Image (cartoon, coloured by chain):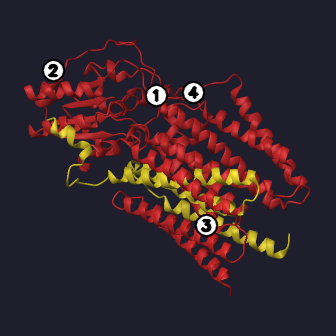
Chain colours: A red, B yellow
Amino acid sequence: MTTLEIVEILVRIAWLVGAVGFVIGLSRMNSPATARNGNLLSAGGMAIAIGATAILIVVRQASGVPVAGISWVIIVLGVALGGGLGLYTARTVKMTAMPQLVSLFNAVGGGAAALIAIDDYLGLAAGSSVRIDTHIFIVLDIIIGSITFTGSIIASGKLQGLIPGKPIYVPGGQLVTLALAAITVIAALVLFVSGTPNLLLMVVILAAALTFGVTMTLPIGGADMPVVISLLNSFTGTAVAMAGFVINNPVLIIAGALVGASGAILTKLMADAMNRSVMNIMIGGFGGGDEAAGAVAGAGGSVRSIGPDDVAIQLAYAQHVIVVPGYGLAVAQAQHAVRELAELLEERGVDVKYAIHPVAGRMPGHMNVLLAEANVPYPQLMEMDDINPEFARADVALVIGANDVTNPAARRPGSPVSGMPILDVDQAKSIVVIKRSMGKGYAGIDNELYTNEKTGMLFADAKEGLASLIAAVKAV
Amino acid sequence: MTAAEIDGLLQALTVFTLAILVGIAVISKVPATLHTPLMSGANSIHGIVLVGAMLIAAEATEPIGQLLSLVAVAFATMNVVGGYVVTDRMLQMFRKKPTAPKPASDDAAAAS
């Protein structure tokens, strides 16, 4: 065997090792205790796979396979650019803005997969015959990669607030989306039957798929974005597997299929946590944006406003307090203040727990991350099913910037939040809500909790409200 | 298609199918707490597309192919590096009992 042949074999084994790292890493990420280790294992597998690829290119060049000098410039420059940008954004992003960054990373992954297929297609000689399986994989890679590229950018823009979070309806939008899908399918079928490269048809497919990603994501409300991002993540995995078929590379096929399948399961789990079906979400139209701020004391029932001193007395003489943190707490960066208040109360012998709704924050598990960042002891964070029976025993439920996940309207049919699992905050003996205004949540509806006679509303920004509470509790 | 080509295609399809089944099996009952990091972790894994981007960059001879592969390499590297770093940042916060307070949270503690 020549050196090149030996190296080719070793590289394939290295790719296999990388794939094993992904599988074991992902399975270790199923539990909090091993999750970090799992991610590092997966990163190690990635480093091995990429390092082996670099060695392969070097040995190929040394063995006489022509590799242009500019190819190395491209690789080094691309890695430096992408790596620098990725490293910088990942290290500096605020934890509240992390979901949109993940979506952006997903977009570029899908884009890269589509570019590989486009490059491969350009390399096919005009008039040559293309095997139908090659054609199918190239077309699928371009379609899925393009949809996830533009779709993820739109999703990211919605979460960042660059694009309004509320569903955007273009007149005849559903028809446009359907028409785009039809164009894509017909163009693809014509290509498959003809069996020869046709650049024009491929451009039509590319353009239709890119637009489809936009029109598919625009009508979906901001509240559903996490599920959408997860679904697009699964798409990217599939696109990468298709790219693996196109360039005949096993590690791309394995890793892509792995992410495609696990991403699909995860999407379903996320949708289940919100009691929605994935189909229902993709059809769109649920929920407004988080900027839907209304006037203080809006429609429907009277609201009792309460001052920080009264709240402080309630809290200081309570036995059990349950804190219900929501996105309002996250945007106000008030997680440190809430921990400080909780510690003050604990010194007074008050039992403090946090009720974490599965979709509190912007993504499932987002709130746990934010509170952990503020060093809130992990055992105090209670998941919904564990904490709900405890609300009846709680003297005070302190709701900070959470809205839809506390709305009792979810228990009745006929409301946009119907069927969504909620925290039983209304069972507590007394309820205090810290909120900037009577603005509506993502679902864009009034919250009946606020007009409950047990509820006192402390109108303030989460951070300022907590600061005044801390001062008041100290003075009690 | 020749017999060898069909053989290769079937092998690739076999690997693809089994990897899908592994992907389904690997995600079992995940606590909601871990949904976001898990999604982010899976997101990093499809950064493996960098391997493909490097291989097409090595073979690129035309300017258009060189441009496409440059963008593909940059995109894929951003996916890999950013994905793993941000996932690790999330998971760092799941430590059960922080032994020493982190600098980031010191200001809040000092204010009390």
Crowd class of label 4 (few under 14; some 14 to 19; many from 20; radius 10 Å): many
On screen, residue A66 versus residue A263, left or right, reads: right
Q: Residue A180 or B23: which is nearer the viewer?
A: A180
Crowd class of label 3 (few under 14; some 14 to 19; many from 20; radius 10 Å): many
> For residue A310, which quarter of the picture?
top left
Q: Which residue is mark 1?
A: A442
Q: Which residue is mark 3?
A: A251
Q: Mark 1 near mark 2, Cβ–Cβ under 8 Å?
A: no
Q: Mark 1 near mark 4, Cβ–Cβ under 8 Å?
A: no
Crowd class of label 2 (few under 14; some 14 to 19; many from 20; radius 10 Å): some
Q: Which mark is residue A167?
A: 4
Secondary structure of the residue carrying tag 2 is helix
Evaluate whether label 1 is on the same chain as label 2. Answer: yes
Q: Mark 2 near mark 4, Cβ–Cβ under 8 Å?
A: no
Secondary structure of the residue carrying tag 1 is loop
- Mark 3 to mark 2: distance in Å? 62 Å
Q: Is residue A375 visible?
A: no
Q: Nearer the viewer, mark 3 or mark 4?
A: 3
- Mark 1 to mark 2: distance in Å? 30 Å
Inspect the image, locate mark 1, and give the three-letter code of the amino acid beneath it: Tyr
Secondary structure of the residue carrying tag 4 is loop
Q: What is the chain letter for disc 4?
A: A
Residue A443, placed above or below residue A355? above
Q: Which mark is residue A364?
A: none
- Mark 2 to mark 4: distance in Å? 40 Å
Quarter of the picture holding the C terminus of chain A? top left
Where is residue A390? Give x, y as percent. Answer: 25, 40
Where is residue B35? Give x, y as percent. Answer: 44, 49
Q: Which residue is mark 2?
A: A310
Residue A341, placed above or below residue A249? above
